[in-house]
Image: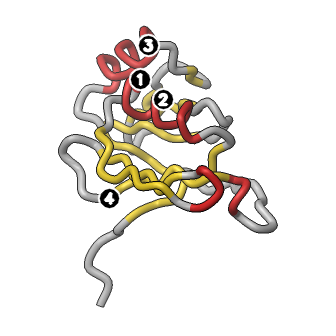
Amino acid sequence: MIENICNVFIFVDNQENAKKFWTEKIGFEIKIDTPMQDNYSWIEVVPKTGQTTLVLYPKALKKDFKTSDSTITFFTKDIEKTFNELSSKGVKFSKKPENTGFGIFTEFYDEDGNTFSLKQV
């Protein structure tokens, strides 16, 4: 039986830029940063109160890389506060938070153009 989600891969052009984005702007912590082949690293970042990690995996090592429309949704207790904090750090959003009837949502982008949702219930 599946009990939890271990990690989610985010495919990035530049691991150092991605690591800075997720730690300095979003506020995640580095869980693992281990050298791999070809001067790349296995990098996992995690929210301070989370278990599931994001693997910042280099696109160059992913054969036949294709973009995806899959979206990861992050939860926050105060979306306005989080929106303002992240915006002040230079995080780009598609729109201001809006109430959809089943939660308050917005979307933000990382520096590789990946889209992520932010939700408050």
Give the residue at mark 4. Answer: 52
Q: Nearer the viewer, residue 41 or 117?
A: 41
**In this rendering, would 96 be left or right of 30?**
right
- Label 4: how many Cα within 10 Å (few below 14, some 14–19, many 20+): some
Q: Amino acid at mark 3?
A: Lys
What is the CA distance from the residue labelled 4 to the residue labelled 2? 18 Å
Whether the residues at callouts 4 and 3 have beta carbons within 8 Å, the answer is: no
Residue farthest to the top, as pictured: 88
Q: Nearer the viewer, residue 94 or 41?
A: 41
Q: Position of residue 67 (x, y in %)?
A: 74, 54
Residue drawn at x 40%, y 63% as measured from the top left: 7
Give the residue at mark 1. Answer: 25
Q: Amino acid at mark 1?
A: Lys
Residue at disc 3, secondary structure:
loop
Q: Position of residue 113 (x, y in %)?
A: 67, 35
Q: Quadrant of residue 63?
A: bottom right
| Mark whose residue sits in front, 4 or 2 | 2
Residue drawn at x 49%, y 40% as measured from the top left: 117
Residue drawn at x 38%, y 44% as measured from the top left: 74
What is the CA distance from the residue labelled 3 to the residue labelled 2? 10 Å
Q: Earlier in the sequence, mark 4 or mark 3?
A: 4
- Label 1: how many Cα within 10 Å (few below 14, some 14–19, many 20+): some
Give the residue at mark 2. Answer: 21
